[in-house]
Amino acid sequence: MSATGARLAVEVVTLFPEAVRAQLAIGVVGRALGRGLVRVGTEDPREHARDVHRTVDDRPYGGGPGMVLKVEPLATAIVAAAARLPAGCPRIFLSAQGRPFDQAAARRLASGAGFLLLAGRYEGVDERLVQEMIDEELSIGDYVLSGGELAALVVIDATVRLVPGVLGDDESAEQESFGTRQGLLDWPHYTRPEEWRGRRVPEVLRGGDHGAIRRWRRKQALGRTGDRRPELLAGMELSSEERALLDEYREEQES
Ligand code: ADE
């Protein structure tokens, strides 16, 4: 634990600190912050701009559209934010050019003392800032966002829910999709009513046979992963029982 008592300390360097803080106030993350399990600070590079206009961006060398975030206000903002983190925490730049952020990356970040996230805006940030002050670059997917704030929130959300004590049941995070050891998609969920628009809740879920329910859920998880994300299934080593469940799922889909 850090000096503040939080299990995880996060800093976000962003031109829109209020928007980031507002989003962090809700749901699981909001509760974790309220209980002091996690601490998230923000630092606005505009506060570090030296001129009267508080300039943070400038035209790109070489020409072209858009503006580039300048090194200097960003560098001092990063130093200020990093000073609130335990030593050695990684500094991460969010960009579409980064390595893919996935559940393994979330686990890695959740197991550390904290991390710093730099959210870019405009066309990008001066590359020298990345070279000098950033440890890794992460992307949340193959699409271009207008800024790194949404990506920072995604990284924080996926990470905070893995911090011990954040979810009611320590295992509930790991049971869900991608959190399972096998890396399968989640199975389908149902609640009342028993029938809606002619669609009935699968009989097995109402029977109370917990062995049968577990088996059905594993079969659905395997089948859905095969249907929707065949590349995930292809990379997995299936037991003979799992292969049998998958065959059973496919037969049921055909009938
Ligand atoms: N900034 C812009 N696009 C992004 C993406 N796909 N992931 C992370 N940060 C981004």
Image: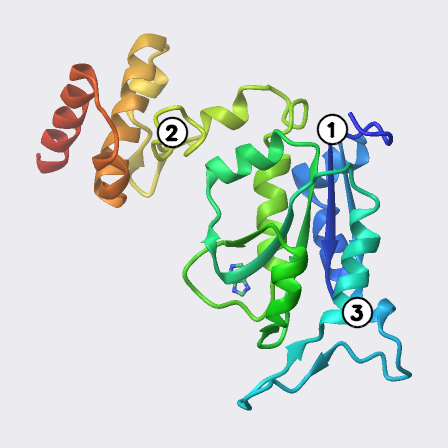
Percent from the top left, x then y, of residue 211? 32, 8
In the depicted structure, whether residue 123 falls above or below residue 187: below
Q: What residue type is labelled 3?
A: Pro
Q: Which of 178/65 is in front?
A: 65
Q: Which amino acid does label 2 sit on?
A: Glu
Residues at marks 1 and 2 touching, judged by CB atoms closer than 8 Å: no
Q: Mark 2 points at which residue?
A: 194
Does mark 1 have its CB less than 8 Å from ligand 1? no
Tell me which residue sits at (66%, 37%) in the image. Answer: 28
- First reached walking from the N terminus: tag 2 or tag 3: 3
Q: What residue type is labelled 1?
A: Arg
- First reached walking from the N terminus: tag 1 or tag 2: 1
Rounded to the nearest angstrom, the CA distance separating label 1 from label 2 is 42 Å
Name the image quarter holding the C terminus: top left
Does mark 3 have its CB less than 8 Å from ligand 1? no
Q: Mark 1 points at which residue?
A: 7
Percent from the top left, x then y, of residue 185? 35, 35
Q: Quadrant of residue 208?
A: top left
Q: Nearer the viewer, mark 3 or mark 1?
A: 3
Rounded to the nearest angstrom, the CA distance separating label 2 from label 3 is 58 Å
In the depicted structure, whether residue 184 falls above or below residue 241: below
Q: Mark 3 points at which residue?
A: 73
Tell me which residue sits at (19%, 15%) in the image. Answer: 241
Tell me which residue sits at (57%, 56%) in the image. Answer: 151
